Amino acid sequence: MDAQEDALTVEEAAENFAAEVARWREVRGLSKRALAERMGFHPSYVSHVESGRHKPTEDFARRADETLNAGKAIWRKWNEYETARVRQSTAAAAVPPPWRTEQPYATGSAIVVEHDAARLDYDGSLYRLTMRRLLRNTGNAPITRYLIRISVDRYPGDPERSNAHYRAHPLTWNELALTATCRGEIMRWEAKHDRDAFKEVWLLFDNDQGRFPLYPGDAVWIEYAYTVSDTKWGRWFQRAVRLPTEHLEVVLAFPATLDPVVWGTETSMTAEASPLPSAPTRREEDGNRVFTWSTTRPALHARYRLEWRFRARPEPDVNQGEFK
């Protein structure tokens, strides 16, 4: 165990464990309820673990790693947590309790996504994702930050290979080149979780020139974008509905010379993956084949996954990744 792991507090280790479970669950396209049922736990148990209301346990870590075929990634996070817990107990250090229910934005705040538009562009070697969201504050307190996630998994069918790949070739902030704007203003951002294949980021409603919080009753468009090489990405794009959403739209643009084909699935809290209720539309545009799919008022916690292959450039491996 390296010096960075030795420095982990119990709280940090618990958050890392919860985030690892969430990452693998989403990679496998499972709802929290579906994972809990497969593991033999109460339907709400996974939700409590991911939110920090339940402490990680050895039994849960083993079952989660096996059920999600995580290649010991979840088990390693459990060992880091257990090491931190034992160290704290031995030292009898007076530290704040690690278990809390975090308000993701601010007490009294409530975000509704009135329009969620995601676009993925591929140039043959790089994927560029641009996300635009119209956010409305329906609560009674200003909102000063917004959480986004970036998760990739090139070999989801082979977790040991995937883990080794990202240990050797971690996803870096420099290559992501993350940018974010609101009302024409640049938004600062802060990393919440930074691991080889998974990032969580707070987009902040401020910059060096001032603050522009989202006040109760107001709505505002935000836009953020980043880039990932196809050596670290893959061939599916998943959208998870974590906030009440009025309209969700996804656009995929690929070089027409690759002869791309696209299909998709929907997963809910109560059902396994099934075909999308409607097929993506297709058009030709400036040398690209553009696929568009949208839905109105998607169910909370639903997941929509679009997958593709290039008939003019087949690959023997199933190389996949995930956008958030």
Image: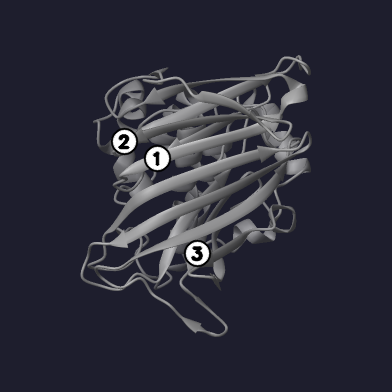
Q: Which residue is rendered at x = 45% and y = 20% of the image?
A: 279
> How far apart in space, not on screen, are marks 2 and 3 (Cα)?
24 Å
Q: Residue at x 40, y 24 (%)?
A: 266
Q: Which residue is mark 2?
A: 298
The answer, for residue 69, to whether it is visible in the render is: no
Of circles 1 and 3, the one toward us is 1
The first of marks 2 and 1 along the sequence is 1
Distance Cα–Cα, label 2 vs label 1? 7 Å
Q: Nearer the viewer, residue 2 or 48?
A: 48
Residue at image position (63%, 44%) is: 197
Q: Is residue 301 visible?
A: yes
Q: Earlier in the sequence, mark 1 or mark 3?
A: 3
- Circle 3 is placed at which residue position? 203
Label 2, secondary structure: give it: loop
Amino acid bearing label 3: Leu
Q: Secondary structure at mark 1?
A: strand
Q: Position of residue 23 (x, y in %)?
A: 50, 40
Q: Residue furthest bottom?
A: 209
- Which of the two marks, 2 or 3, is nearer to us in this view? 2
- Amino acid carrying label 2: it is Pro
Residue nearest the observer in this picture, 155 or 306: 306
Determine contact: label 2, label 1, CB under 8 Å: yes
Q: Where's residue 182, x and y in %?
A: 49, 67
The alpha-carbon separation of the residues under discs 1 and 3 comes to 20 Å
Q: Which residue is mark 1?
A: 248
Q: Residue 235 sits in which quadrant? A: top right
Q: Position of residue 106 (x, y in %)?
A: 31, 68
- Left or right: 225 as drawn, with respect to 245: right
Where does the image place residue 5, in percent across and percent down from the top left?
61, 56
